[in-house]
Image: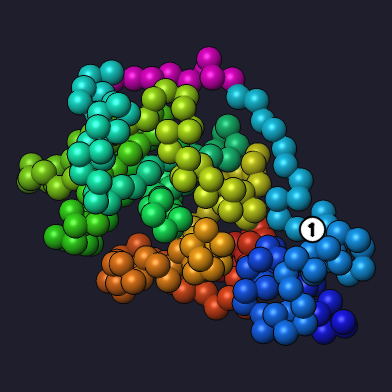
Amino acid sequence: MLAMDEELIHGIRDNGQSLHHLYVSSKLLQLTCCERTIRRYIYKGYMTVKAHELPRYVRYSHKYDYAKKKIVNVERMLGRTFSDFLNYVKENPDSKVWEYDSVVGKVEDKKAILTITFPQTRFQFGLLITKESYRSVNAKIRNLQSKLGNLYEQIFEVNLSDNGVEFTKFHELETDEYGVVVSKVFFTNPYKATDKPHCERNHEFVRYLIPKGVSLDFLTQEKVNLMFSHINSYVRASNKNKTPYELMFELFGEEFMNAIGIKRIRSKDVCLKPSLIRTTKK
């Protein structure tokens, strides 16, 4: 019982892991009893780790002032609406679809994170950008196109973007710098987070490390890569207990992972606590 208690403390309290992730990664826990029993012990107060320390134990609702948001450059939407997207994937069901959004901190911040999500595997990575700058977003994607070369159009076939100001010129990324078509771009409906649910869902893991209201200006791309390396090495029940990293490596290989700066983290070392990126040097 003592060994199990110590295992729970290290995984959940120290590293912010979920009980499911810890259980799948720990032979000790699996040999002791079932996951459901351990959860019951925690909820009954038998263990040092308490129920409120489990991820998702407490949920908060948030209200947003949508009136302050502004949609610009309506012309970009021609042939690229969410309805156009649904029709396209219906006609091309095997297309590789990616979702794009941004994570922000404080109002006065100069930095933000562009998040790029592959729903099929729950994989998400991030690029540090200048907040609300479409030039910064496009420059980051152009750089990714340059790194991947011909591999880019094979991987990023369909791209579904948020409607924020930082995506004002996102449709220009359908072609490379020479005007050759390399992908399809579509936009979600205004104020409809449900149009890109996988992207939004994955932001929950980002908020474990960077709670809402915390400034992002301390971030470097190295810290962003480290954060998403841990997030993508986190066991998902929805992936049949495989990590997003494992599934993406199987699909796209080492060259892709190196290009986006994501590495595999051992299950025992996965940490979803703010201290991960606050104490890491550049």
Range covered by the magenta-colored residues: 65-73
* Residue 134 x/y as whole percent: 33, 35
Q: Is residue 118 visible?
A: yes
Task: Locate residue 77 relative to residue 21 in the image: left or right.
Answer: left
Q: Local crowd at mark 1 within 10 Å, few (<14), some, or many (≥20)?
A: some
Nearest the viewer among 36 and 15 is 36
Judging by the rendered image, the residue that carries numbered circle 1 is 53
Position of 140 relative to 70 (above/below)? below
- Quarter of the image where the N terminus is located: bottom right
Residue at x 47%, y 45% (from the top left corner): 198
Nearest the viewer among 198 and 255 is 198
- State how the image is colored: rainbow
Task: Locate residue 249 relative to residue 200 in the image: left or right.
Answer: left
* Residue 3 x/y as whole percent: 82, 84
Q: Is residue 7 visible?
A: no
Residue at x 29%, y 42% (from the top left corner): 159
Q: Is residue 80 magenta?
A: no
